[in-house]
Image (spheres, rainbow, N blue to C red):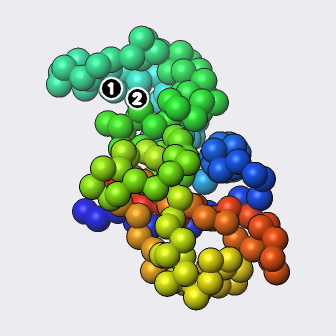
Amino acid sequence: MAGVTQVYFTEYQPDAEIALQQLRHDIFVKGDHKAPTKLELEYLLRMSPNEQEQEVTRMRIFHDKYNIYNHPSMVNARARIEELQRRMQQIDTLFLEDDGMGTSSILDIFHASPIWIPDNEQLVHTAYPAPLGVIQMVFGTIRPTHMQVESLWEQLSPNRCTSLYFLVYAEEYPTEWCFIYTTAD
């Protein structure tokens, strides 16, 4: 399956790495990402305590039967719920879930490279600055406005599980960063 391309904007500040980390934090806090932990937690919390115990026992038996790693929190429902709540507090834990497929959001991008690297040498989970020639070609300027980016960003498509980033301007001044991300799934 081809990845899905998404666009994110975050407030301007001079360092792209700091801007990316702030964006990741904001997306994490808003809960705007896929998270198996979140789904399992919501599922368990809708049940009565008795149903929770039965479900955790069922999951433990399933994991044992198919030789899947059984987290120590599978002892009982309360321990499992507490473990899921703890995981929901950590960005990096979310990425490791779902067999490392990540969150299908910008949370899966860990670092902003200061330099462009050719497509065939790019590392996954990294944001790269969009080449100025590409920005000029897509937006007709090297200083695109928010409105231009909103209407044309889909013409940019980073490799799966990578991101392109560039500055967005109001008049002659940078006002925000744009990160365009393609999911791994």
Residue 64 image point, x, y percent: 23, 18
Badge 2 marks a residue whose secondary structure is helix
| Between 53 and 24, the one nearer to me in the picture | 24
Q: Quadrant of residue 99?
A: top left
Q: Residue at x 41, y 70 (%)?
A: 157
* Camera sees residue 105: no
Q: Is residue 22 above or below residue 182?
A: above
Residue 58 image label? 1
Q: Is residue 73 above or below residue 129?
A: above
Q: Decide: few, some or many residues near mark 1? Use Cα within 10 Å; few <14, some 14-19, many ≥20.
A: few
What residue is pinned by disc 2? 55
Badge 1 marks a residue whose secondary structure is helix
Disc 2 + disc 1, Cβ < 8 Å: yes
| Between 78 and 105, the one nearer to me in the picture | 105
Amino acid carrying label 2: it is Glu
Q: Residue at x 35, y 37 (%)?
A: 100
Mark-to-mark CA distance, 2 and 1: 5 Å
